[in-house]
Image (cartoon, rainbow, N blue to C red):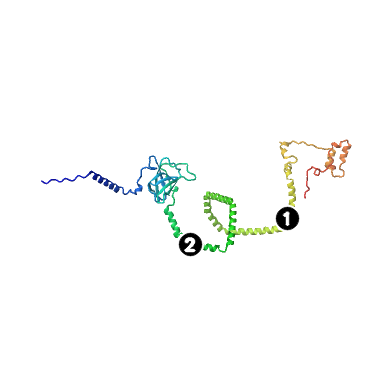
Amino acid sequence: MRGIRLPKRVAPKKVGLRLAVLAAATLMLTSCGQWRGIANVPLPGGPGTEGGHTTLYVQMPETLALNANSRVRVRDVFVGRVRSIELVNWVPTLTLDLEPGIELPKNTLAKIGQTSLLGSQHIELNPPDQNPSKEMLRSGDTIPLAQSSAYPTIERTLAGISGILTGGGIPNIEVIQTEVFNILNGRADQIRQFLGQLDTFTDQLNQQRDDISRAIDSTNQLLNIVAQRNDTLDRVLTEFPPLIQHFADTRDLFADAVTALGRLSAAADTTLRGSNANLHTNLQNLQRPLKQLSRAAPYLVGALKLLLTVPFNIDNIPKAIRGDYINVSLNLDLTLSSVDNAILSGTGVSGMLRALEQAWGRDPNTMIPDVRFTPNPHDVPGGPLVERGE
C-alpha cells in the first residue's frame, strides 16, 4: 500500500518574514503618491513637536530648496520646524510649528536663509528693527507675502559672479582705461580748475541745504494741495478747451477792441499834451489850499459841529431846542470900552469911547483891555503858532 505524502511544515520565522515583506510592499504601493523623500518623514522630538505648540502660516514668493522638517529660527535660535509646504491660491505657503511661549509681533519678517554651504536652508523669523507691532502673532495667523523674502543663496551668488567674469564687461576695462587716459592726459590744469569749482559748488550747495530741504517740503505741501483738488483740476481741464474755442471764434472782436483802445489812447495823449502846462499850473495852485486844509485838519471836526447849526453847537441842539421853543441865554456887553474895541478899532476915533468911560469914573483895571496896546496872541511867547499861508 502506497503511503500518503504529507506537506512539509513551514517554519514560523519564515512566515513572519514573508508577512513583513508583504506589508511593506503594500504600504509602499498605497502611499507612493504621497512619498516625497526621506526628508519629509516627521521626526519625533525637537522644538515644535510637543503638545501646545504654536502654528503659523507663512506666504513665500518662492521656496527655493526648502524642505519639510527644516528648522525655524528666531534670532539664530532653533525654535521650531517646517511641518509642510503647500500651494494655496497659487501662493507657496509654509506651515510652521513653534515651541510654546514664543512671542512675535504682528509685523514679523520671514526669510529663507542658508544654513550651511552644502545647501541646507531654514526659515528665519525676526521682528522689525523699527516700529514693531504691539499686537502679537497667535496660533493660526498668517505672515503675508509682503513680509517675506529670501537671502541670496550660494547658487545665485556664484551665478552672478560668473556672469560678471564672463559677460559683465571685464574685457572692456582696458578700453575704458585707455579712454580715461586720453581724457586726462595734458589737461591737468583744467581738471584742477574743475575740481576747485566743483569743491566751491559743493560747499555752496552744503550751505544751502536748509533752503533746499525747505523748498522740497514746500513742493511736497503744494503737491498735496494739488492732489486734494484733483477733482477741481479735472473739471478745469474739461471745461477749458471750450473756452479756448470761444476765444478763437471771437478773436476778431478782441482785435477790434485793442484797435479802439489804441485810438482812445492816442486821443487822450493829444488832449493831455495840449493842456499839460495848464494842468501843471492848476495842480501847483491846488497844493496851497490842500496844505492849509491839512494843517487845519485837527480843528475841522470841531468847526463842522458849529457850521451847520450856527449859533449852536450840534451837541447842544437837544438841550437848546425843546419842542416849539428855544432856550437861549444871551450876555451883551454894551460898555463903552467893549463898543470901542468892536466897532471903532482901526479907525481915527479909536479910543474915544474908552476915554469917555474913564472920564465918567470907570477904573481902567476893570475895563476890557485895549486892543491897540494888547500884543497879538499868536505872536506872544507860548501862544498858538499860526503860519502865514503861502
**Identity of the residue drawn at 85% across and 37% down:** 365
Give the Cα distance between marks 2 and 1. 84 Å
Q: Name the residue at the left extreme.
A: 1
Amino acid carrying mark 1 in the image: His
Residue drawn at x 74%, y 49% as measured from the top left: 291
Q: Which residue is at the front of the view, 343 or 154?
A: 154
Q: Are marks 2 and 1 in contact (CB under 8 Å)?
A: no
Horizontal and vertical percent position of residue 127: 46, 45
Q: Disc 1 designates what residue?
A: 280
Q: Amino acid at mark 2?
A: Asn
Q: Disc number at residue 195?
A: none
Badge 2 or badge 1: first in the primary sequence:
2
Where residue 349 appears, as percent x and y from the top left, is 87, 43
Pair 2/1: label in front? 2
Is residue 263 shown above or below 358? Answer: below
Residue in the foreground of this view, choosing between 305 and 137: 137
Residue that numbered label 2 is attached to: 172
Q: Position of residue 15 (x, y in %)?
A: 24, 45
Identify which residue is drawn at 61% across, 58% down.
Answer: 258
Secondary structure state at the residue bearing disc 2 = helix
